[in-house]
């Protein structure tokens, strides 16, 4: 009897350990399934975005394809001209702004130098006075 009980206890322990192992494996599989489901949902979103982008590109191509080569060239050059004109305007504004700042700085320096020079000369003229000395004889 004791041997049977030992065997049953041992068998029960083996079954418990197998159950624990299976539970761990089941949790691991559930995590993997969740990960796969998350990846699939991300892939579906990316596919939708790619489909929308592809559709936009196809519409643009069909619009361009309906044009002759010269019309397409003119449209492309017109778009480039518009973009470059805008960038050139920004560059000109930037250069003019920098030139104004430099001109104002130079004007300040010149004005300050002129004031300092005039003030020095004027101060000398106004502060020097003649004092008459009496001769002592």
Image (cartoon, rainbow, N blue to C red):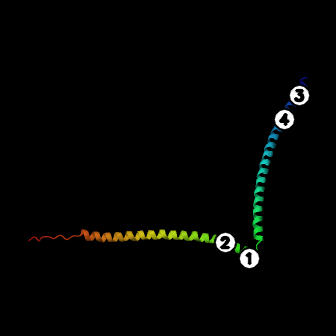
Q: Few, some or many C-alpha atoms within 10 Å of disc 2 (few <14, some 14-19, many ≥20)?
A: few
Mark 3 near mark 2, Cβ–Cβ under 8 Å?
no
Q: Few, some or many C-alpha atoms within 10 Å of disc 3 (few <14, some 14-19, many ≥20)?
A: few
- Residue 28, given in percent of the width and then of the height, sits at 80, 42
Check disc 3 and report its element: helix, strand or loop: helix
Residue 70: assigned label:
1
**Alpha carbon distance from label 3 to label 4:** 16 Å
Camera-side residue of 116 and 80: 80
Horizontal side of 129 relative to 79 (left or right) equals left
Tell me which residue sits at (79%, 48%) in the image: 37
Precedes in sequence: disc 1 or disc 4: 4
Q: Few, some or many C-alpha atoms within 10 Å of disc 4 (few <14, some 14-19, many ≥20)?
A: few
**Alpha carbon distance from label 3 to label 2:** 86 Å
Precedes in sequence: disc 2 or disc 4: 4
Check disc 1 and report its element: helix, strand or loop: helix
Precedes in sequence: disc 3 or disc 2: 3
Tell me which residue sits at (65%, 73%) in the image: 81
Mark 2 near mark 1, Cβ–Cβ under 8 Å?
no
Check disc 2 and report its element: helix, strand or loop: helix
Whether 13 is drawn above or below 125: the answer is above
**Alpha carbon distance from label 3 to label 1:** 91 Å
Tell me which residue sits at (73%, 75%) in the image: 71
Precedes in sequence: disc 3 or disc 1: 3
Mark 3 near mark 4, Cβ–Cβ under 8 Å?
no
Residue 5: assigned label:
none
């Amino acid at each position: 009897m004791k041997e049977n009980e030992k065997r049953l206890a041992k068998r029960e322990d083996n079954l418990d350990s197998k159950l624990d192992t299976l539970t761990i494996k089941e949790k691991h599989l559930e995590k993997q399934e969740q990960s796969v489901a998350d990846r699939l949902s991300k892939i579906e979103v990316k596919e939708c975005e790619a489909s929308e982008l592809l559709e936009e590109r196809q519409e643009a191509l069909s619009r361009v394809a309906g044009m002759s080569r010269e019309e397409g060239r003119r449209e492309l050059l017109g778009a480039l001209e518009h973009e470059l004109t805008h960038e050139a305007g920004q560059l000109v504004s930037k250069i003019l702004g920098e030139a104004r700042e430099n001109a104002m700085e130079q004007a300040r320096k010149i004005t300050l130098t002129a004031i300092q020079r005039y003030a020095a000369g004027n101060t000398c003229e106004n502060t020097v006075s003649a004092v008459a000395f009496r001769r002592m004889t």
